[in-house]
Image: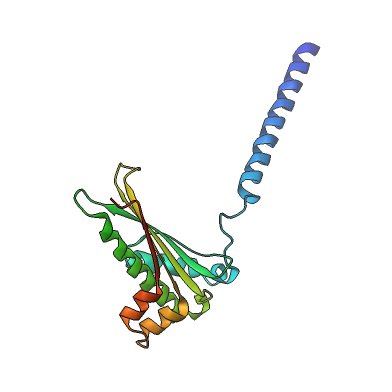
Amino acid sequence: MTTRQKFIIAALAIADIAVILTIALLYVHYTVYQPLRQPVSSAFESHNCRWQAAVLMAQARLSGTANITSDDTLRFEIIYPLVQKQQADQAAQAIWYAFDVAWALQSQYRSCATFTRVEVVVTARREHQETDEASFSAAASVADLVAFYTGSLSEETFIERVSYSVSGLQ
């Protein structure tokens, strides 16, 4: 093997090592050092509360996510797929199912009851139509939620205390 061939092999080996190190550094940078979208409560994470919320949401036939934000708000983001002739306002019922999930977390999984407010955002969307969607939002304090589910607050009063908003409904 000539000196030139040895030089070419050494250069290719160095280039291989450089490429492998670059890929490793990029992988570490984009997986380890990326911040969460929303800060979440460590108690919510440490007690498998995210898992419990996911199980309860699946049982309620809700598709989406549940997180505790840094201001102790349990936030649901739900996608509600609409079938061909279904009205978008029917998706608003998912807000009540999410309140049921929040109540179950509050009453059955006490270690997960670290939230003081519940926010629900339901996005109703027709399949294969990203632009035709409606959004329903509701927020309630946990004190009102507990009072409603324990019977010390009427449904009418609870509905008055919940803040609602709707967008994109035609």
Residue in the foreground of this view, choosing between 111 and 84: 84
Give the left or right position of residue 85, taking residue 22 as reference: left
Q: Where is residue 56 shown, x and y percent of the image?
A: 38, 69
User: Residue 2, can we see it?
Assistant: no
Q: Residue at x 68, y 28 (%)?
A: 16
Count of numbered marks = 0
Residue farthest toward the left in the current orientation of the protein: 85
Q: Where is residue 154 shown, x and y percent of the image?
A: 33, 83
Q: Where is residue 151 shown, x and y percent of the image?
A: 34, 87
Residue farthest toward the bottom in the current orientation of the protein: 152
Residue in the foreground of this view, choosing between 111 and 17: 111
Q: Up-down: is 50 above or below 107?
A: above
The type of colouring in the image is rainbow
Q: Where is residue 64 shown, x and y percent of the image?
A: 40, 58
Q: Up-down: is 112 above or below 23?
A: below
Q: Residue at x 49, y 80 (%)?
A: 110
Q: Up-down: is 144 above or below 83?
A: below
Q: Residue at x 23, y 55 (%)?
A: 87
Q: Up-down: is 164 above or below 80?
A: below
Q: Residue at x 80, y 13 (%)?
A: 3
